[in-house]
Amino acid sequence: MRRPLVAANWKMHLLRAEVSAYARAFPRQLGNPGPEVVLFPSFPLLDGARQAFAGRPVALGAQDVHPEANGAFTGDVAAAQLRDAGCAWVLCGHSERRRDHAEGDELVGRKAAAAQREGLRPLVCVGERKKERRGGETLAVLDRQLAGLFASPLDAARLDLAYEPVWAIGTGKVATTAQAQEVHAFLRSLLAKIFGDAIAQKVRILYGGSMKPSNAPELLSQKDIDGGLIGGAALETRSFVDLVNAAIAAK
Ligand code: PGA
């Protein structure tokens, strides 16, 4: 009932020529209807990616957005500028931004709200750190993250979530299927408490953190895992397309 969503987080990788080569190797059709596929390149690659992927079944998103509509914010990018550049999506609250730019839950919520005001769809990342999982605090951390996030006036029907345990990102250490499904079901129950069950059943919750073609089928077979947010394994067309196909096969 939820259309799977497979997203590539290219982080601070790739140059324009590499994006063009990636696009040339990318299929023109992906199943019927197939999953929704979104690419998140760095800002300078957005326009080239838009041209290179024209006619391909992918949407584009940015990796960050400023919470204000415009103004004196040197180095930042506004939601309207992203829409103007061909984006339909924005990644909000990735753990690398939380870590390197001190982004907290309230700010992440304001960024997601700014995206929605411009008609962009936020993909909002949450997830616990290693210390927090070890301390048995995982669910409490996620509860707090969602509460901070939804302090902003967000329309839950126009966003998706990504559960990314920080200790699994770029480490090769993937969450077990049981660990991931437990958290996804918990997140859905929190959404149900805040927004009601009908909305909670519509929000897609992606898993992210060392997902690759070998571990994706099992993760994606879980009831509450609706796709993947993929870093390392999305840097090459071949493994990313394998992941897209795994989503088609699993759902
Ligand atoms: P990874 O990154 O797949 O390389 O672990 C995922 C992410 O950071 O979104």
Image: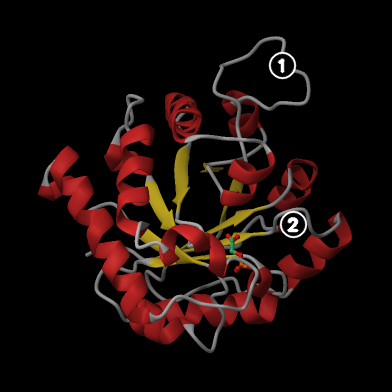
Q: Are marks 2 and 1 in contact (CB under 8 Å)?
A: no
Label ID, residue 73: 1
| Residue closest to the far top | 72
Label 2, label 1: how far apart the Cα atoms are: 30 Å
- Of residue 85 and residue 124, the one placed in the foreground of this image is 124
- Name which of mark 2 and mark 1 comes first in the sequence: 2
Q: Amino acid at mark 2?
A: Ala
Q: Label 2: which residue?
A: 52
Could one spot residue 57 in this view of the protein? no
- Residue 228 percent location from the top left of the image: 47, 67
Q: Quadrant of residue 223?
A: bottom left
Mark 2 packing: few (<14 Cα in 10 Å), some, or many (20+)?
A: some
Mark 1 packing: few (<14 Cα in 10 Å), some, or many (20+)?
A: few
- Of residue 53 and residue 145, the one placed in the foreground of this image is 145
Q: Secondary structure at mark 2?
A: helix
In-image side of 135 versus 203 (left or right)? right
Q: Quadrant of ligand 1?
A: bottom right
Q: Does residue 192 sit above or below 139 in this rendering?
A: above
- Residue 16 percent location from the top left of the image: 85, 55
- Residue 182 percent location from the top left of the image: 27, 69
- Of residue 133 and residue 101, the one placed in the foreground of this image is 133
Q: Residue at x 30, y 63 (%)?
A: 184
